[in-house]
C-alpha cells in the first residue's frame, strides 16, 4: 500500500484528533474502514471505494501514517494451522513493589501474545497461544511461578473466539433501536405504569361503596 494526507476536507465535521495536528474526519474514518477489510488495497482502488481523488487518498493515507493513526501493516494468520491450537488467558497477581521485574521477565516470553494491566481481583491479564494444554501448564507452573514478582495466577482456557476484529472505529457504533411506546390499558393508562388518584377521589369512592 502506498502512502497518503492531511487536513479535514472543507465542510466536514472532525471526529477526533490524533498526534499533534491531524483531526480525523469522516473521510479518514472511511479510509480506515476500507483498510480494515484489505490492508493491501492499492491507492487507486482505495480512492474509488472512499469516493475521493487518488491524490487526496494518497495524501490522507500518508498523514494517517505520519501521525500514528496507522502504526503499520502485518499478516493475520490462522493459529490452528500454524500449530498453536490452544489459547489461554492467565490472570496474574503481581507483588506491587516488583512491577519492573515482572515486565522485564514477561518481555522474554515469546509465547505471550498480549498482556494488559487490569483493575479488579488480579493485576494483569496475559494471553498465550500454545501447542497443547501441557505446554500451557508448563508455562504457568514452571516459568511464571518461578518469577519472584508473580504472587498468584489463574488460568482460563478459551473454547471459541466468537468475535475477533482487527480494530474498531467510532463509526462502528450504531444507535440503539427505539423501543415502541407502551400500549394503553382499558382505562387509558400505559401498561407497566401506575395510576395515582387524589386522596379526595379515593375517599369519595370509599364513601359510595359503604353507602
Image (spheres, grey):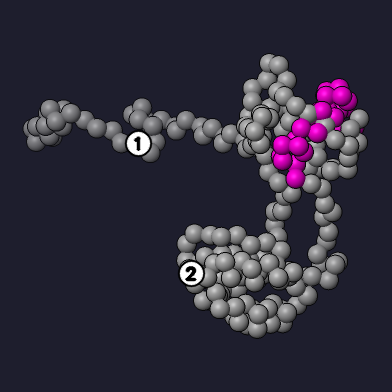
Q: Does the magenta stretch include residue 60?
A: yes
Which secondary structure is most common in the magenta stretch?
Answer: helix
Could you give the CA–CA distance between mark 2 and mark 1, rounded to whole angstroms?
55 Å
SS class of the residue under badge 1? Answer: loop
SS class of the residue under badge 2? Answer: helix
Q: Residue 181's x, y, as percent?
A: 47, 30
- What residue is rendered at 75% in x and 77% in y? 132
Q: Residue 85's x, y, as percent?
A: 78, 70
Q: In which quarter of the image is residue 188?
A: top left
Q: Residue 53's x, y, as percent?
A: 86, 22
How many C-alpha atoms fall within 10 Å of the one at disc 2: few (<14), some, or many (≥20)? few
- What residue is rendered at 56% in x and 36% in y? 176
Q: In this view, does 193 lie to the left or right of 147?
A: left
Q: In which quarter of the image is residue 131?
A: bottom right
- Quadrant in which the C terminus appears: top left
Q: Closer to the N terminus: mark 2 or mark 1?
A: 2
> Where 10 falls versus 124 (above or below)?
above
- What residue is rendered at 72% in x and 82% in y? 134
> Where 166 falls versus 96 (above or below)?
above
Q: What stretch is highlighted in magenta?
A: 45-71
- Quadrant in which the N terminus appears: top right
Q: Residue 196's x, y, as percent?
A: 24, 32
Q: Quadrant of residue 147?
A: bottom right
Res. 193 mark:
1
- What residue is rendered at 28% in x and 33% in y? 195
| Residue 144 seen in render | yes
| Residue 89 seen in render | no
> Where 68 falls versus 116 (above or below)?
above
Res. 97 mark:
2
Res. 169 mark:
none
> Where 162 falls versus 30 (above or below)?
below
Q: Which of label 2 and label 1 is nearer to you?
A: 2
Amino acid at each position: 500500500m502506498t502512502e497518503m494526507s492531511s487536513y479535514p476536507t472543507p465542510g466536514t465535521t472532525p471526529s477526533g484528533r490524533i498526534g499533534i495536528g491531524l483531526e480525523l474526519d469522516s473521510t479518514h474514518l472511511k479510509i480506515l474502514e476500507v483498510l480494515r477489510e484489505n490492508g493491501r488495497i492499492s491507492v487507486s482502488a482505495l480512492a474509488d471505494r472512499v469516493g475521493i481523488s487518488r491524490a487526496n487518498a494518497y495524501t490522507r493515507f500518508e498523514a494517517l501514517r505520519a501521525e500514528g493513526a496507522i502504526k503499520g501493516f502485518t499478516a493475520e494468520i490462522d493459529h490452528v494451522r500454524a500449530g498453536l491450537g490452544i489459547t489461554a488467558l492467565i490472570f496474574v497477581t503481581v507483588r506491587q513493589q516488583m512491577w519492573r521485574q515482572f515486565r522485564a521477565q514477561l518481555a522474554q516470553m515469546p509465547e505471550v501474545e498480549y498482556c494488559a494491566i487490569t483493575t479488579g481481583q488480579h493485576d494483569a491479564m496475559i494471553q498465550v497461544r500454545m501447542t497443547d494444554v501441557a505446554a500451557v501448564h508448563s508455562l504457568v507452573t514452571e516459568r511464571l511461578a518461578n518469577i519472584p514478582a508473580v504472587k498468584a495466577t489463574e488460568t482460563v482456557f478459551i473454547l471459541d473466539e466468537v468475535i475477533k476484529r482487527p480494530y474498531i472505529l467510532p463509526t462502528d457504533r450504531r444507535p440503539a433501536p427505539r423501543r415502541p411506546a407502551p400500549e394503553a390499558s382499558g382505562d387509558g393508562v400505559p401498561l407497566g405504569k401506575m395510576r395515582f388518584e387524589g386522596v379526595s377521589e379515593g375517599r369519595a369512592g370509599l364513601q359510595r361503596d359503604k353507602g
